[in-house]
Image (cartoon, grey):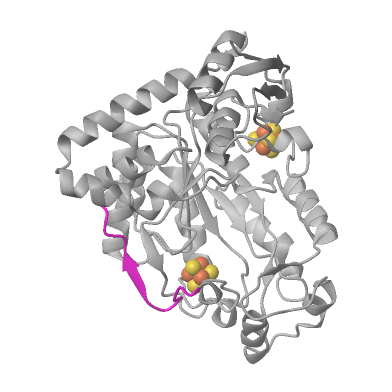
Amino acid sequence: MALKLSPRDLYYRKILLTRELENKLPLDVALKVRGDYHARKPPRPCGATVHSVVGCAYRCTYCYLPDMGVSNSVYNIYALSGEEMTYALLSNPSFLPGRLGTLIAIGSLGEPFVDDSAFHRTLEYLQAFSRYLGNPTQFSTKSALKETQVRALASVKLPLSPLVTLVTLTKSERLEPGAPSPEARLETIKMMRKNGLHPVVFLRPLIPGVNSEEVDDMLAASKAHGAVGVVIGGFRVTPLILDRLEKAGFDTSEIRRRVKAELRQGKQLPLELHDVKKEALAIAREKGLVPFLSACCANNYTAMLHDGLRAPCPGLDYIDGKFCTLCPVNCPSIQTAVDESEVKEFVEKLTSVKVSELQLDEKFIYLRLAGKKRIPPHVRAVLEIGYRRKVVVR
Ligand code: SF4
Ligand code: SF4
């Protein structure tokens, strides 16, 4: 049976939840939260990123935070409470609540479990998302968690996607001088699996000439400790990162060979890694791990493991095929049902413009709007996430 998609229903739920939280939060707090970064930031393909901690203490040699003006040796726990963060997300015009809403990812600007206070703040966010939202939620970590902490995470009623980063088994002292050891992270993976979570190993960054020779060993160890999959990520380099790698004694000639533009201070340049990633994908399959090329696909996959629902990935990676590895969700084969009159009415509500022409198929929504050639990014995000179709305005 086709999966019914109705972002209009999610949108009305969003309004009700917003009112519920407005009734709970003092007015001055609600006003402050509406000005928070999480309430205003533009949509990203991976969904809504949430920062429970800004900064880190693990001082990884390859870390891009210092290039973004964020410390990787000092951190701050985010000031918003769980309900305030939930309200911030609901205030963001591109966010949709619910299992079929926006994917949430915690941890891109800091380590969410860097100490006990960070753990409590992150757990508080997860519990609030469970109480109000129900969106598939991912976190990425390098921390060694205690079993009590893993149990607390596993008890949160939410489609939860744990990503545990592992980039080396042998060079962590030079690559990640302040982080828990790879062995401790593998133990964390084991505990997560034992407690009913579906941990995915985050193999990022993949650095040619530095850790690319370890992929086989890392994936074998991850599988042996209970990981269900692996996200194979790239590597973005800056002059500062190259400098740190060289000072740590690494040969960077292979990295420099793969940078296709001129290196400039503060500008992160992606490396051409097609061949290395292809090999890592093959190794992952051979080891019995489900491979991904994007973290949002891992989030969508673990949500399916959580509740059995196969839903097309909101990142829409399967439409252009660039990042889709055809994981067991098998997005291209999922039939979805969308009510054409709802699409028209909903687009008109969001844009305040009449729809003069509308065509739908399984992958696209083609629109013609009276007197407009474009729609705002947040409207596009709501439509594309809600209907799981790319929007083309003619
Ligand atoms: S754990 Fe992540 S955020 Fe922290 S220093 Fe390492 S790369 Fe940077
Ligand atoms: S089928 Fe492809 S697009 Fe869908 S979740 Fe899996 S990897 Fe991602």
Principal secondary structure, stretch drawn in magenta: loop
Is any atom of residue 4 visible in this view? no
Where is ligand 2, by quadrant?
top right
Give the extent of the magenta segment. Answer: 69-81
Left/right of residue 340 with respect to residue 185 in the rendered view: right
**Closer-to-camera residue (204/40):** 40
Which quadrant holds residue 2? top right
**Closer-to-camera residue (364/254):** 364
Instruction: Indicate the position of residue 321 as horizontal and vertical percent values.
Output: 78, 38
Is any atom of residue 242 visible in this view? yes
**Closer-to-camera residue (115/362):** 362
Quadrant in which the C terminus is drawn: top right
Q: Residue at x 76, y 69 (%)?
A: 213
Q: Residue at x 53, y 31 (%)?
A: 382
Quadrant in which the N terminus is drawn: top right
Q: Residue at x 31, y 47 (%)?
A: 34
Residue furthest front in the image: 371
Instruction: Indicate the position of residue 45 as horizontal and vertical percent values.
Output: 60, 44
Where 247 sits versus 339, above or below? below
Q: Residue at x 69, y 45 (%)?
A: 291
